Amino acid sequence: MDLPDAEALCGELARKLRAGVTESTGLVGIRTGGAWLAERLHRELKVSTPMGTLDISFYRDDFDVAGLHHQVKPSQIPFDVNGRHVVVIDDVLYTGRTVRAAMNELFDYGRPGKIELAALVDRGERQLPIAAQYVGATLSVPSGKLLRLARDERGKFFLRLSDAQPAA
Amino acid sequence: MRNPQLNGDGSLQHLLTIEGLPREVLVHILDTAASFIGVTEREVKKVPLLRGKLVFNLFFEASTRTRTTFEIAAKRLSADVINLNITVSSSTKGETLLDTVDNLSAMHADMFVVRHSSSGAAHLIANHVASHVHVINAGDGRHAHPTQGLLDIYTIRHYKKDFSALSVAIVGDVLHSRVARSLIHALTTLGAPDVRVIGPRTLLPTGVEQLGVSVHHDMREGLADCDVVVMLRLQNERMKGPLLPSAQEFFKSYGLTPQKLALAKPDAIVMHPGPMNRGVEIDSSVADGPHSVILPQVTFGIAVRMAVMSILAGN
């Protein structure tokens, strides 16, 4: 199937986010694709609050069946979460389980004032009552396919579709 | 022979000894521990990984540091923890080790953390329990203390970053030390090129060279230009035996003083698994001095034990 240009979607997402973020908004990317995206958006939107990254491995709901993810990296939230407007950023929004885990983890840093969600692609098929406020594009992807953001050696974004079972 | 710690797919089922564990397994544990360090610095110092799991701390031998850090680690993973100090419980009434384990298994134990004075006790339990139950050796006789070895290499990696050009000196009672054995296996697996043991002949096991270490009886020679000095505890009961003349004599030859430490590299770190005997194997000015990382070792120990427990529970 034809995949949209991730760079164009990123520009679209930045345009939509510009209206919603302020100097003090905390941008938080979910590893790995969401963290790359957050890095780019943080630079383009010139947000002064340092960006955060979350590795949700310790909060996944499939630990009992899948075990611990093999390459856990430390989460880093370099700002005070309490009372803050936080935008959680992920590359592909699918079942909503990753976002659920990310929100649970965020609350262990404090009590955010407001959490919003930005995703480059929304592929639908939600299994939880979760919705994104900022979306680059909605896309229908056959179930059983894994869609994720990738980067070439120059840092240019592109979308990659593979047969691997998508993680929840 | 199949490694009894590993599942069919090579993942870790139990942690009994570092000996024979592949490098990737050690690195995975260290990397996971690094992620848990951040958890312990947050407002809520807990993650939900082991929610609903029941962990038994089975200590047949006295311990403060190890038992407490295992308890904190399990609690930070949201497990329920039961501490059993068996020296004063069932075994004094004559119950066998495996009967104790069976009874706790009947209470739906998911994990046993075992310290025992007999080498092989944790292996025995691991071979006995059902396949969904995990066993961690928290020290068995003179044999192994794998989580101590792991927290030691975590500490070394934290301060020295890389093992490939490292000189590590392990000093003192190597003969009776499960800590030394676990650390030597970990260091050689990670490729540390220069591991030395230093001590009197009577406190070094015969054939220790076969573990890939060099043997020294003189601190001046053994400490020269090393990056890491690991002091071992001289167990009080040994001092009365025939292996040593006296604690004072031992301190004179092998106690770590600022003068002896000056032989090591200027940025050398000093480690000790605890509990320390000040004035026997280590001088207070070194234990509390700028080279000492003895207390950070304890803190890192929590994250390392969280890593081990969560990796086992997920396999």
Image (cartoon, coloured by chain):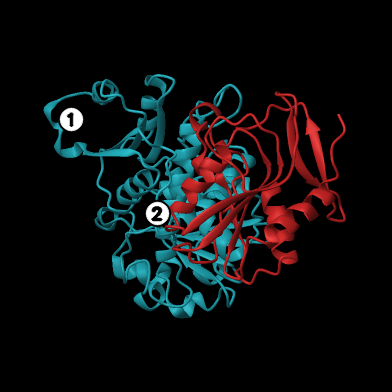
Chain colours: A red, B cyan
Tell me how many marks there are: 2
Q: Residue beneath label 1, please?
A: B91
Type of amino acid under label 1: Ser
Q: Residue at x 45, y 63 (%)?
A: A83
Is the residue marked by circle 1 packed among few (<14), some (14-19), or many (20+) residues within 10 Å? some
Residue labelled with disc 2: B45
Q: What residue is drawn where x is 58% and y is 37%?
A: A96
For numbered disc 2, what is the local secondary structure? loop
Which chain does the numbered disc 2 sit on? B
Please tell me whether mark 1 sits on a helix, a strand or a loop: helix
Q: Quadrant of the C terminus of chain A?
A: top right
Q: Can residue A118 be seen from the camera position used here?
A: yes
The one nearer the camera, B104 or A131, is A131
Of the residues shown, which amino acid type is indicated by label 2? Lys
Q: Looking at this view, is A13 or B67 the one in front?
A: A13
How many neighbours does mark 2 have within 10 angstroms: few (below 14), some (14-19), or many (20 or more)? some
- Label 1: chain letter: B
Which percent across, then down, holds residue B93? 12, 28
Q: Could you tell me which residue is drawn at 75 percent across and 65 percent down?
A: A44
User: Which label's residue is closer to the chain start, 2 or 1?
Assistant: 2
Residue furthest out toward the left: B93
Q: Position of residue B262 (x, y in %)?
A: 52, 79
Occupied quadrant, residue B274: bottom left
Cα distance between the residues tagged 2 and 1: 36 Å
Quadrant that contains the N terminus of chain A: top right
Q: Which is nearer the eye, B203 or B14? A: B14
Instruction: Give the left or right position of residue B297, taking residue A4 as reference.
Output: left
